[in-house]
Amino acid sequence: MSEKSSSSGSDEDVDPESGQPVELGGILSKWTNYIHGWQDRWVVLKNNTLSYYKSEDEREYGCRGSLCLSKAVITPHEFDECRFDISVNDSVWYLRAEDPEHRLQWIESIELHKAESGYGSETSLRRHGSMLSLTSAASALSATSTSSFKKGHRLREKLAEMETFRDILCRQVDTLQKYFDSCADAVSKDEFQRDTEVEEDEDDFPNTTRPDGEYNHNNNGSKEKLFPPTSPKGMNGIDFKGEAITFKATTAGILSTLSHCIELMVKREDSWQKRVDKELEKRRRVEDAYKSAMNELKKKSHYGGPDYEEGPNSLINEDEFFDAVEAALDRQDKIEEQCQSDKVRKPRLTPVPPGDAYSTIGTHRYATKVEEMVQNHMTYSLQDMGGDANWQLVIEEGEMKVYRREVEENGIVLDPLKATHAVKGVTGHEVCHYFWDTAVRLDWETTIENFNVVETLSDNAVIVYQTHKRVWPASQRDVLYLSAIRKLFATNENDPDTWLVCNFSVDHDNAAPTNRCVRAKINVAMICQTLVSPPEGDKEISRDNILCKITYVANVNPGGWAPASVLRAVAKREYPKFLKRFTSYVQEKTAGKPILF
């Protein structure tokens, strides 16, 4: 995944000039729908918006969709380490990153954009120069409707009283502080003056006595107090006693008002707590109802999402899976019937090469593998199943019988299937030719969506890649296989020659597996022998005298995680239909034409 910038959810991901998270762009796989599955898209994260484009080169044509991240919910997938889902209401984007590290990078960047989307975020406040203060808080409180405080008017009155008491108390504290400072200065001066006068008396009047210790005797015999009494108003005209009484009354009023406020707040707290509990209970019920509704909505709106696909962690159970597959197959059958009734087959000029062209082994790089497959099918596929208890007869319709042997490996159904059939009026050469010829494959094979020849190895061997039509909720399958046609001469002159087409999976650089499809592995063989009944008299052999004995074997590993019951039910339903459809096509193509042995 290529990206324009990386993001880890730190301060480095914020543009220092604008204060906004930096832009992030890159390739993510986005789930489109159940037909096209995961598709690579160019995704851009910018300005709290997630947008996607078909490719980076098509950005100039505008985005194909966008999500505002303000209310987005980002959910990392529980099992898929590369996947994360983004939902806004009923819109959900399913996204997959290249690896878990890139998924974490995208999630952190999206969360950062989402966090910075609100006006009240730290970066948003910093960008707009906003700053909370006591002034702004007071303004906001004053702007609040008074109706919400009707029951609390007494508390407001008490708070106003507290403001008044605070002002009075501050003034009283200042006054008392001045008084205390004056007292301290006066005491210091008096002590200094007393010490000075005592020293002078001792020098000038050594015989003077102070029997009371508080009076000084003047020369005229009168007494004078050494320290004159303080004025009742105190120093600097302050009434200390009055101020003390007022201070005591103020503090008592404050304590009383505080007690009243506490009582009111306790009562209001009980009332508000009850209201909060009721609101929380209402919110819980609403949230539960919302979650339930969203879950139901997701099931209905996103029933075709990746969580309802085939897989070990699919949200769809086995019964629903079976019903969905059966309904999809029924729809395909109806569409095919309509197409068959509406279209007129155009004759294809596909001359059938002579049998000798198919009798050689070949010299291509897979020649040895082809010969090995042919010999294995001739040895084991033509064996009679009557004595083998492992084979179960599951379908019997006229000359056609279908057998199955139940085999599972690591929870994946690998049941071998074997069908025998007898078709009048066609030869083994003709049946195998139309089964192998890629030019007419789409005329009778209705399950194929795309088909092309990857490489032609020889005249009788090709490598083919084909994708099959998707049957939701199963994942779409593709197959890459080598298809070879061979004619095997009989070792006994009384036995008929055998025609065989074998298709087995191979690898090729030009058709590597993709995330869009689950690669299936196959080993299939169509083995045909022509039986001729002698005509009456001298008549020439006609198509009424020939009978093709068909043995069809299929060993298929479907891959993926489809339920075993579904795979077995589909095989039981589709294989007989395939054989009847194909043999009817061969009879139609060969009718009225010369017999080709």
Image (spheres, helix red, strand yellow):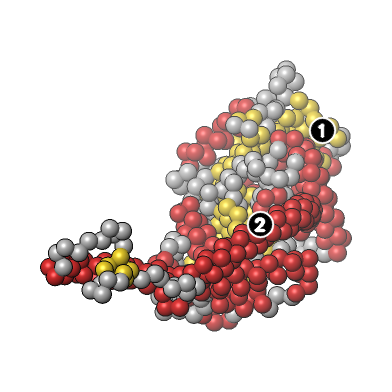
Query: Around disc 1, counting alpha carbons within 10 Å, would you say few (fewer than 14), some (14 to 19), or many (20 or more)?
Result: some
* 364 w.r.t. 13: above or below: above
Residue at position x 77%, y 47% in the image: 325
Q: Quadrant of the C terminus?
A: top right
**Image location (x, y in percent) of residue 400:** 81, 35
Answer left or right for 163 relative to 422: left
Q: Residue furthest front?
A: 221
Say which residue label 1 marks: 395
Query: Around disc 2, counting alpha carbons within 10 Å, would you say few (fewer than 14), some (14 to 19), or many (20 or more)?
Result: few
**Residue 429 appears in which quarter of the rendering?**
top right
* 58 w.r.t. 6: above or below: below
**Image location (x, y in percent) of residue 534:** 81, 35
Q: Residue furthest left?
A: 203
Q: State the residue in front, 77 or 28.
A: 77
Residue at position x 47%, y 38% in the image: 368
Q: State the residue in front, 433 or 260.
A: 260
Q: State the residue in front, 136 or 245.
A: 245
**Residue 453 appears in view:** no
Three-letter amino acid code at the position of disc 1: Ile
Q: State the residue in front, 379 or 2.
A: 2
Say which residue label 2 marks: 259
Residue at position x 71%, y 45% in the image: 315
Answer left or right for 339 relative to 363: right
Could you give the CA–CA distance between mark 1 and mark 2, rounded to whole angstroms? 93 Å
| Earlier sequence position, callout 1 versus callout 2 | 2
Residue at position x 63%, y 76% in the image: 140
**Image location (x, y in percent) of residue 515:** 56, 53
Three-letter amino acid code at the position of disc 2: Ser
Residue 551 shows which numbered tag?
none
Q: Residue furthest bottom?
A: 60
Answer left or right for 216 relative to 442: left
